[in-house]
Image (cartoon, rainbow, N blue to C red):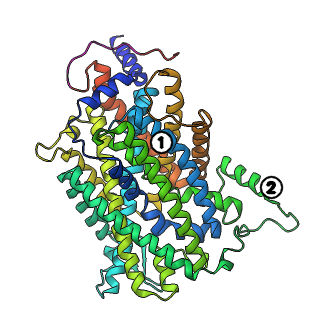
Amino acid sequence: MASVSGVGRGLGRMFQRKSVGQIQAELEHSELKRSLGALNLVLLGIGCVIGTGIFVLTGQAAAQWAGPAIMISFVITGVLCALVALCYAELASALPVSGSAYSYTYASMGEGAAWIMGLLLLLEYGLAASVVAAGWSGYFVSLMQDFHIFIPPALTAAPGVPVKDAAGIVVGMGVINLPAVAIIAAAIALLVVGVSESATANNIIVAIKLTVVVAFIGIGALYVNPARWSPLIPAQVPSPPPGTPMDMGHQISRALWEVITGNSHSRYGIGGMIHGAAVIFFAYLGFEAVSTAGAESRNPAKDMPIGILGALIICTILFIATSAVLVGIVPYTSLDNPAPIATAVNQIGLPWFAILVKIGAIAGLSSVMLVLLYGQTRIFYTMSKDGLLPSQLAVVHKRFKTPWINTIIVGIAACGAAGFMSLHALADLTNVGSLAAFALVCVTVIYLRFSNPDLARPFRTPLYPVTPILGAIMCVMLLMSLMAGSATRNFFLIYLAIGIVIYFAFGIWNSKLGKGIAVTGHEAAPMELPSRTK
């Protein structure tokens, strides 16, 4: 009976919630250095967003799914991210902590849901860094070839991934993506040294890649052929059966039904445009990474909303302009390659600019990795402080004031994924984890409005509750579109199952909240489970 009672108490801990006061108190006792201002946070977000999406996935999504409608796909995803960003901005200003969405969920839906959020964020940040490293490797190998330096094909791709030359001919099969492993190792070394140094490097890199992107838009616009934008939404392939013409209303209804039923792998048409929005969702990952820096922001209540919304607005404008120029220069069917922007520059006969674009892409992807890995280490740091992960992950280096053990472990895992998993598999899993996490963030805003109506909110989500509700619905729709693939769905479900087992084997029994221990390490009176009827 005693063991049964113990298990019951353990299960009850799943629904314990941190109070808002506890989370804010943790901020006051943080050992992390407060060195980031509003401009640093905006550049941090841009540094993460402008990367693999714009340099790699834009061309693939246009060629495989959306055609010239990739421009509309970016608008769809931009609207979704704007809704989510407004929710993030409210939470980040009210709860400026290092754990981002993990901490927000802990305060609303309880410890069990917070653990699930931590698993989702591991996909969003940890695997995303590996995706970016794979894209970085492609541009790096191409640039080296321009200087007549050739890396053996077996060392430039994951096992079993075919390696193609500039003409699209397979020249070998991958064994390990060595450049991807090397760049992650370099980023981890920089993060161990310290946030201030990392932020300075990030600012320089962001300036370089923004210059390249803006130059591509400005120069490329002179070579755009508007005829390539027509038809804006190509006919669906395969087309509907003869004798069944579909007007725009029927196409939209059919596309939404495909998403709802998980059968949305349409190529072109309205369905392809929507699926294209799900694919390029990866391009927007990073604007919310600003929220992981709450404990290191000098004035989080003011600077966090500026950082999140500022990064999103700037990047959305650049995405739409870049995709318009891209499909206006090159036929969208020719963009299914790892370096579509370089392809467009070659098309207009400016090889010198193609080299410049590759350098900008390499710089841009480097900063993205830096921000993603930074975000993941801070989430693990917070979970460790809560007792849900081993305490070693929260050890701060005496000199550099960074969670160095945690950072090295994250780096080793990211190196393994980048070296031995394909770009396609990594991108899909990252999108699934991110969309699920974003939906929970939208729900958290609604919950806290009910449970803590008097909480000081320097920034309030406008058009509440419409904004968080629409954000959650759109996240779920795109999530179901991606989950139509059995490999992605199965991996995701197995991953969650393993994570839940780890929680019940370790986290639930070592939780400081469950033991009545304050996160600062001092003993506290045992806490009662908060009422769930509030």
- Of residues 345 and 257, which is closer to you in this image? 345
Residue with the mark numbered 1: 437
Q: Is residue 524 above or below residue 57?
A: above
Q: Which residues are magenta?
A: 521-529
Residue with the mark numbered 2: 250
Where is residue 343? Give x, y as percent: 49, 80
Where is residue 444? Give x, y as percent: 49, 32
Residue at the extreme top? 1
Task: Specify which label sits upstream in the sequence, 1 or 2.
Answer: 2
What amino acid is at disc 1? Answer: Ala
Considering the whole magenta stretch, tell me its main secondary structure: loop
Quadrant of the snapshot with the N terminus? top left
Residue 67 on the magenta span: no
- Of residues 280 and 166, which is closer to you in this image? 280
Identify the residue at image location x=45%, y=30%.
Answer: 457
Mark 2: give few (<14), some (14-19) or many (20+) Cα within 10 Å. Answer: few
Identify the residue at image location x=60%, y=57%.
Answer: 75
What amino acid is at disc 2? Answer: His
